[in-house]
Image (tube, rainbow, N blue to C red):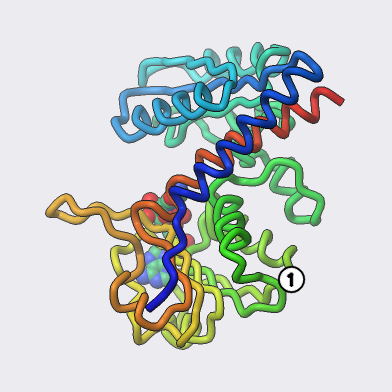
Amino acid sequence: MAIIIDGKKIAQDVRNEVKEEVLRLKAKTGIVPGLAVILVGEDPASKIYVRMKEAACEEAGFLSREYKFPADVDEGKILSIISDLNRDDEIHGILVQLPLPGHISSDSIIEAIDPRKDVDGFHPYNIGHLFTGNPFHMACTPLGILELIDRSGTGIEGKEAVIVGRSNIVGKPLALMLLARHATVTVCHTRTRDLPEVTGRAELLIAAAGRPEMITKDMVRDGVVVIDVGINRLDDGKLVGDVAFQEVAEKASHITPVPGGVGPMTIAMLLKNTLNAAVARSK
Ligand code: NAD
C-alpha cells in the first residue's frame, strides 16, 4: 500500500513558513506583502476560490484587496484597474480570477499585469523565463506539485516522468519545471495513441486531464509516485481525482489523495509567490 502524500499538511507547513517570513520582512523593512484579487461575474466556484485566497492572505499577515465587477463590465475598466495596481506600491501581487466572461480577452488582461506582480505566473514574460530556465514567477499548481514531490522526498532527477494533460496552467508549465529538475519528461494528451503504454513507463506520474478515475492500476507500474491533479465532481456529489485511488494505491509507492493532495498547495504557492514579489521589491 502506498504512502499517502498529505497535501493539506504540507500546504499548512508552507503557509506557516510564509507567515514567519512575513513577520521577518515587516520587522526588517516595514514591507507587508499585498495581493489584489480581481473577480468578474458571479461564478460560484470563482467566488469560493477568491474567498479562500483572501482568508489565506489574512492568515499569513498579508494585505489583501478585492476588486469585484459585474459580468458585463468593460474590458477597458479592468485594464485601467490593473494599470493602477501596477503602480501601487502596497500591492506586490495581482491576480485575475479565471475564467473571465467571453467578451473579455484573458490574454490581454494577463499581458497588462506587470510581470513582477504576475503571481499566477501566466504572463508570457514569466512563461518565457520558465522556458529559458531562468524563472521568476511560476504557475502555482505545478509549483505546488513540485513542492509536494520535494517534501515527500521521492526525488525528481533522472526519473521517467509522465504528465497526462497539456494545459497552459498545469501540464505544459509542469513539463518545463520537471525538465529543469532533470527528469525525462513525456506529456500525454487526448491524441496520445497508446496511453497505458506511456503511463506504464512512468516512475513519476502526474494526472491532470480532468477525467474522473481514468488512471487505473493496469496503467501504472509498481512503485510509481502518483500525483493526482484532477478535481471531478461525480453525479452523486462525490469529489474524485483523475486516478482510481484505491486500486492504484495498491501498486504505487506514494500517492496524493483528492481532496487533500494538490488542491491545498495552489493557494500556498500563491502566497509564496506574493511573498517573493514583496521580498524582490525590498531589495
Ligand atoms: P484542461 O481541460 O485545460 O486540460 C486537460 C488536458 O488533459 C488537455 O491537455 C487534454 O488533452 C488532456 N486530456 C483530457 N482527457 C484526456 C484523456 N482521456 N487522455 C489523455 N489526455 C487527456 O484542464 P486543466 O485546467 O489542466 O485541469 C485538469 C484537471 O486538474 C481538472 O480536473 C482541474 O479541475 C484540475 N485542476 C486542479 C487544480 C488544483 O488542484 N489546484 C488546479 C488546476 C486544475
Q: Residue at x 35, y 69 (%)?
A: 243
User: Which residue does the numbered mark 1 point to in the structure image?
Assistant: 182
Can the viewer see residue 63?
A: yes
Q: Residue at x 42, y 28 (%)?
A: 50
Q: Position of residue 227 (x, y in %)?
A: 47, 65
What percent of the width, then of the height, locates residue 46? 37, 32
Q: Tell me the quarter of the image containing the C terminus.
A: top right
Pick whichever, 212 or 100, lies toward us: 212
For label 1, the crowd category at 10 Å Cα-Cα, with few meaning under 14, some 14 to 19 and many 20 or more, is some
Find residue 146 and report its image quarter. bottom right
Q: Residue furthest right?
A: 283
Q: Nearer the viewer, residue 56 or 240?
A: 56
How many numbered discs?
A: 1
**Is 247 located above or below residue 12 in the figure?**
below
Q: Is mark 1 within 8 Å of ligand 1?
A: no
Residue 82 position in % (x across, y down): 61, 18
Specify the farthest residue to the left.
236
Q: Is residue 27 left or right of residue 4?
A: right
Give the position of the N terminus as an image quadrant.
bottom left
Specify whether 22 is left or right of 281. left
The residue closer to the viewer here, 40 or 154, is 154
Q: Is residue 15 above or below residue 247?
A: above
Which amino acid type is shown beneath numbered disc 1?
His
